Amino acid sequence: MTTTSPKTIIKADISISKKYKTYLAICWISILVVLYCMAGSSGYFEIVFLTTFTPCLVTICIIYGCFLYPISRCSLELTNKGLSGQRKKIFSTIQLQLPMDKIDNIMVIENARSKSYGGKTVSIRSASGLIKFPWVQNADEFVRVTLAEIEKYNQSLKNVDKNLVSAIAGNSALKAQPQQSAAQKIKDLKELL
């Protein structure tokens, strides 16, 4: 028995838009410049700069560790077997291996928060719950292709069901013919006696 590896159909582009990254960089650089100028205008440059720069640098590191780093570790892809991927949060990781027949619904959510980050949220509903993947740049295309593949999968299941029903009906017709001919033979034998 051989198993085939899943073939990737489409991958979700999970990232923050370049526009938002530029916005973050400009904000943090301007804050550092203001702090540097404030520290330079006072006579106590080292003390003021260290007491204001250090908390600002720590804040930048915390934001990167809690927000930007997990985004770069998320993935979502549609294969011929179903959806697979992972969503990294601050202290946990969600692994997703969802076959086609277990997907109840997949949708795109666009709100003010996701607009500001330059992406949309893809929500996947299954019997086990709702899983959201934010910051998907190609969300509309990903959902469209996924829904088309689910429809193709459901159509192939219907074709298999029709073939199975016709095969069962064909077998029952074959079984019915020998019973009729056997009954006919018995009737003929009774007539001979």
Image: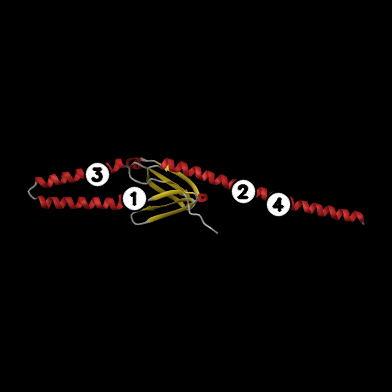
Pointer 3 local density, CA inside 10 Å: few below 14, some 14–19, many at least 20 = few
Spatial separation of the CA atoms under disc 4 and disc 2: 15 Å
Query: Going by the picture, which residue comes out furthest to the right?
Result: 193
Q: Residue at x 66, y 49 (%)?
A: 165
Q: Position of residue 176 (x, y in %)?
A: 76, 52
Q: Position of residue 72 (x, y in %)?
A: 34, 50
What amino acid type is highlighted by mark number 1? Ser
What residue sits right under mark 2 in the picture? 161
Judge whether 66 appears above or below 24 on screen.
below
User: Residue 104 vs residue 132: left or right?
Assistant: right
User: Residue 12 vs residue 59: left or right?
Assistant: right
SS class of the residue under badge 4? helix
Q: Earlier in the sequence, mark 1 or mark 4?
A: 1
Pointer 4 local density, CA inside 10 Å: few below 14, some 14–19, many at least 20 = few
Q: Earlier in the sequence, mark 1 or mark 2?
A: 1
Q: Residue at x 41, y 42 (%)?
A: 139
Spatial separation of the CA atoms under disc 1 and disc 4: 56 Å
Q: Residue at x 74, y 53 (%)?
A: 175
Q: Earlier in the sequence, mark 3 or mark 4?
A: 3
What residue sits right under mark 3 in the picture? 25
Judge whether 70 appears above or below 151 on screen.
below
> Residue 72: which numbered mark, if any?
1
SS class of the residue under badge 1? helix
**Camera-side residue: 66 or 7?**
7
Pointer 1 local density, CA inside 10 Å: few below 14, some 14–19, many at least 20 = few
Spatial separation of the CA atoms under disc 3 and disc 4: 71 Å
Q: Earlier in the sequence, mark 4 or mark 2?
A: 2
What residue sits right under mark 4 in the picture? 171
Spatial separation of the CA atoms under disc 1 and disc 2: 43 Å
SS class of the residue under badge 2? helix
Pointer 2 local density, CA inside 10 Å: few below 14, some 14–19, many at least 20 = few
